[in-house]
Amino acid sequence: MSVLVDWLEMLAEQVRQWGRFSIFTARLFAVTPRALLRFRLIVEQLNNTGARSLVIIMLSGLFVGMVLGLQGYDLLRRFGSTEALGTAAALGLLRELGPVVTALLFAGRAGTSLTSEIGLMSATDQLAAMEMMAVDPIRRVCAPRFIGGVLAMPLLAAIFGLLGILGAYLVGVVIMGVDSGQFWSQMRSSVELKDVVEGIVKSVAFGLACSSIAVFEGYYAVPTAEGVGRATTRTVVVSSVAILALDYMLTAALL
Amino acid sequence: MSVPAAGGWGRSVAVITWPFRHGLRVPGGRLIGQVYAHGAGLVAAKAAHCAALGEVRMTMALADDSQASVSAAARLSGVHYQVRGHSVFKDLNLSIERGKITAIMGPSGTGKTTLLRLITGQLQPDQGQVSVDGVDLAALKTDQLYALRQRMGMLFQNGALLTDLDVYENVAFPLREHADLPESLVARIVLMKLQAVGLRGAARLMPSELSGGMARRIALARAIVMDPKILIYDEPFAGLDPIAMGVVLRLIRNMNQALGLTSIVVSHDVQEITALADTVYLLSEGRVVASGAPASLHNSQDAMVRQFLTGGEEGPVPFHYPAADYLQQMLSQEVPQ
Ligand SMILES: Nc1ncnc2c1ncn2[C@@H]1O[C@H](COP(=O)(O)OP(=O)(O)OP(=O)(O)O)[C@@H](O)[C@H]1O
Ligand SMILES: [Mg+2]
């Protein structure tokens, strides 16, 4: 009996959390136009979330591309069509791995820092002080970070894809000896605009999801050291699940 | 209009001493900033700046404060407030007189900070009414509440400086958000306020490089940068050395007298409050247990008042948070639930 009650309570809390999240994102979107005017704040956040994630994104992109080159080469060799390696790597990176892995890394690198930063600001009364100075913290603190994250994600995914293709080229062509001309020409002839669009749509969607979750968790974090820690963990967990679920839905919709 | 002395309050106050409202207009007619000012600092600096640079023409409408007819700057009536089942206020009634310094005293944890948050509309009472300038806060929309808050300044108990901005930017923050002023003017105003708290030299330090007392003084400079009409101080003296304490004490009194500000000061320091306040409210267990001029409280025979002013542990004001019987709890094997 009490298990059932616990369950219901948990369910109710989930529903409440969803409600809070919906209201929060509605407020976030409502202040976004005005926040966009504060160009300098957004550039600052682009630097914070985007530029500081650059190294990890580039390194990961290179390694993922190299693995793809190796696995792809082994697979295609069984069908005697190793010259298709360029196509395989480009499609995999553009449509799936680029957006998804970038978003997962982004949630871990930038999302956590957004959550803990905003959570600590609230724990030290900085958000309350802002409200006292008649400044809406959602507009001044949350919105620029949200916008910065949304802008950074597609750019990071593009860089990830670029480095990935370079990695696949290194392994496939330089090490395994696939013909360089074939690698590029096959890629060029079979990758379509639609594939690029799929990648862009996905990375924008992941950017919206990751940034709003990170900012929300920070804003509603219990204002203590422990509360901020938990919120940070939740950012990673919730973002990761959201990314993978969204990925399935978008893939199905865009196929 | 004379140029305000960089020395800060004392002399710039001499320039204009009545409340008025004004706007700054550029020749094209675009309103570049509207500041509701009660006094001299910002206004005089603006005037000086306009005179010096000639780049803006100022139109000033001197008007009586429209709200001056309402005598109480803030009033709480029949306020009940609970947090997580713990009742902080039960039927609290209190009024803050305009132009006076009102002190709120009471044991730690009685809800003094909570009271300030009710007055500023950061919290809403479960029951009862909170009004500021005769306006019921519950009736205000968010932007109206924000407009009201531009006329209030609050010093938080721990300073609450923005950690990603340096001292200068912290003090400039309200100006940048609310008034689109030229940088040279912002600098003049900020330096004037920093000078008033004795920390002009610390302008480029980050909040993490400040001591607790310094952070509080910077927060005070930030609270007064918009020339508010109501200034709220949450424990302004805690953690200050005697010199800084004297400075802050004089600052509070001077601003109050010269600019006709309404000040609300939360403090435990009986001596300072006696010297400073016009009216004292003593809170305990969610109610006002005594109020009046500091002298009348000192003469009071009330056991509760005497206990608080002399600092006795035993007495009607409970030093302990509500708890089970001490002896019984110590003798039993039970662990607090
Ligand atoms: N978020 C909260 N959750 C639970 N209880 C709270 C919360 N905030 C405040 N309280 C309770 O409300 C009461 C009043 O707190 P408040 O901070 O207003 O006290 P205070 O008078 O300012 O104390 P101090 O002099 O120590 O600053 C305390 O008993 C505290 O336990
Ligand atoms: Mg307090």
Image: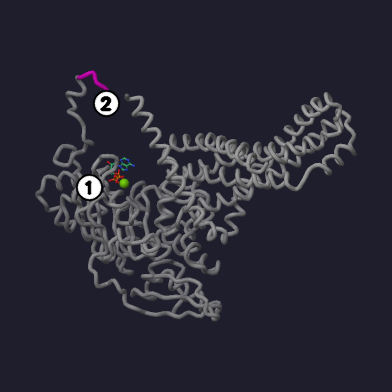
Q: Is residue A26 left or right of residue A8?
A: right
Residue linked to disc 1: B89
Amino acid on which disc 2 is placed? Pro
Q: Which residues are magenta?
A: B332-337
Q: Nearer the viewer, residue B49 or B6?
A: B49
What residue is shown at x 55% (from left), y 41% (from top)? A113
Residue A123 position within the rendered picture, expressed as x and y whole percent measured from the top left: 42, 43
Q: Residues within 10 Å of mark 2 (few under 14, many from 20)?
A: few
**Gap between marks 2 and 1 measured at Cα:** 25 Å
Residue linked to disc 2: B336
- What kind of element bears circle 2? loop
Residue B333 magenta: yes
Residue B8 position within the rendered picture, expressed as x and y whole percent measured from the top left: 42, 66
Q: Is residue B280 above or below residue A163?
A: below
Which subunit holds the residue at mark 2?
A: B
Residue B292 position within the rendered picture, expressed as x and y whole percent measured from the top left: 16, 57
Quarter of the image with the C terminus of chain A is top right
